[in-house]
Amino acid sequence: KKHRPEAWGNEGGIKCAMETQPIANRSATLDVGTDWRLYAGAQDVLKTFRRVPVHFVDITALSELRKDAHTSVHTLRQGKLLTPEQQANPKTYADCIHWCLPGLPDTWNQFLYARIVSSASTQRQE
């Protein structure tokens, strides 16, 4: 689903290309291809851990809003940058799966770091 232009709100077929802003309006249902069965499965697996403390840092909703954070046509294919001709054809060549660095993955790391620091602080208090 994430590969369909309609999921990005771009009927012209450019998918995530040309996006410069995160999604700001959450009043509409957002369908960018998240597999909610996998999400629920991960949550269920975490509930089975009893002896080992495992925590889930949920970045799903945050990431879904960042349609502007993908590499789009500024990406590599088979280890090479796209040619200008390929970049001019985002319907075929836009990469809407991978994320730009620096960018959103750095935010994920900040959440993870905050979770680790918070857990360490809680353990010291006990």
Image: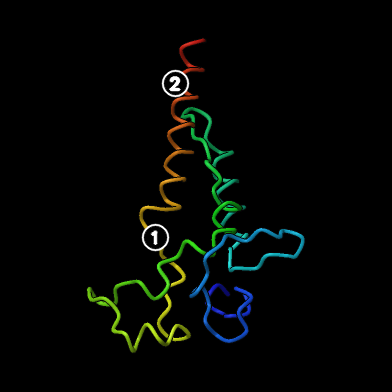
Between residue 88 and residue 16, name the one nearer to us.
88
In the displayed structure, does residue 30 sit left or right of residue 65? right
Circles 1 and 2, Cβ within 8 Å, touching? The answer is: no
**Residue type at numbered disc 2:** Ala
Q: In the rendered image of this protein, does residue 2 appear above or below residue 99?
A: below
Please tell me how crowded label 2 is: few (under 14), some (14-19), or many (20+) other residues with Cα within 10 Å.
Answer: few
**Rendered residue at 28%/84% (across/down):** 83
The secondary structure type at the circle numbered 2 is helix
Say which of marks 1 and 2 sits in front: 1
**Residue type at numbered disc 1:** Cys
Between residue 111 and residue 89, name the one nearer to us.
89
Q: In the rendered image of this protein, does residue 18 appear above or below residue 52?
A: below
Colouring mode (rainbow / by chain / secondary structure / one colour): rainbow
**Rendered residue at 33%/89% (across/down):** 85
Residue 125's spot in the image, x, y percent?
51, 10
Residue 39's spot in the image, x, y percent?
58, 54
Of callouts 1 and 2, the N-terminal one: 1
Count of numbered circles on the image:
2
Residue under label 2: 120
Between residue 123 and residue 94, name the one nearer to us.
94
Distance CA(mark 1)–CA(mark 2): 30 Å
Between residue 100 and residue 38, name the one nearer to us.
100
**Rendered residue at 60%/73% (across/down):** 8
Residue under label 1: 100
In the displayed structure, does residue 77 sit left or right of residue 28? left
Residue 15's spot in the image, x, y percent?
53, 77
Residue 98's spot in the image, x, y percent?
41, 65
| Quarter of the image that includes the N terminus | bottom right
- Which residue reaches farthest left? 79
**Rendered residue at 48%/24% (across/down):** 119
The secondary structure type at the circle numbered 1 is loop
